[in-house]
Image (cartoon, rainbow, N blue to C red):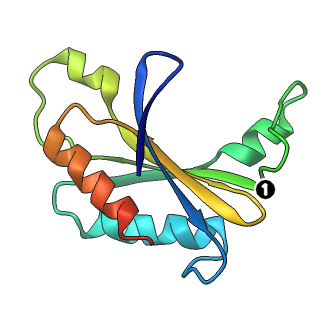
Amino acid sequence: MQDATFMGKYPIHTLTVTKAGGRYSTTETLIAALQKKVEANPNAVFIALFDHFSHTASLPDGEVAEGILAAQQIIFCFGIKLPGPEVMAVRPRSISVTEYEDHFVISFMSAPNPAMNDTMKNWVESLV
């Protein structure tokens, strides 16, 4: 898993998973595996799935980078503490799966809670 700063300010984690010999052949199967992990976690609640590719491709001025075949997000929340309104700015969480011809890119933004961040890293890393 690679750690990076996107656009100079967003801490993200990214993992590339090859399709060859892998357990997953579609974005939907990867998202379904992540949804099972969210639903099995007593501190997490599943909120929704979002098909970012379809949304962007349907816009009159929508642009999808060459090579992207699918892009979906699973949206969920851990929400084990609500210390004030500021925490709402970084919730809910999401993990994205972007599909290319021969690989997937799975990515998410760091969570403020280190334990929840580690949980998301473990979920993603368990997919390989």
* Residue 20 picture location, percent across and down: 66, 78
At horizontal 17% and vertical 36% (from top left) the residue drawn is 113
At horizontal 31% and vertical 54% (from top left) the residue drawn is 121
Q: Is residue 50 above or below residue 58?
A: below
Q: Residue 38's image quarter?
A: bottom left
Of residues 123 and 48, the one nearer the viewer is 123
Q: Residue 2's image quarter?
A: top left
| Quadrant housing the C terminus | bottom left
* Residue 16 picture location, percent across and down: 55, 57
Element assignment for label 1? loop
* Residue 45 picture location, percent across and down: 29, 54
127 sits to left or right of 111: right
Q: Is residue 119 above or below residue 55?
A: below
Neighbour class for label 1 at 10 Å: few (<14), some, many (≥20)? some
Of residues 126 and 71, the one nearer the viewer is 126
Q: Residue 52's image quarter?
A: top right
Q: What residue is disc 1 on? A: 69
At horizontal 57% and vertical 73% (from top left) the residue drawn is 29
The residue type indicated by label 1 comes to: Leu
* Residue 31 picture location, percent across and down: 52, 64
At horizontal 90% and vertical 27% (from top left) the residue drawn is 60
Count the marks.
Answer: 1
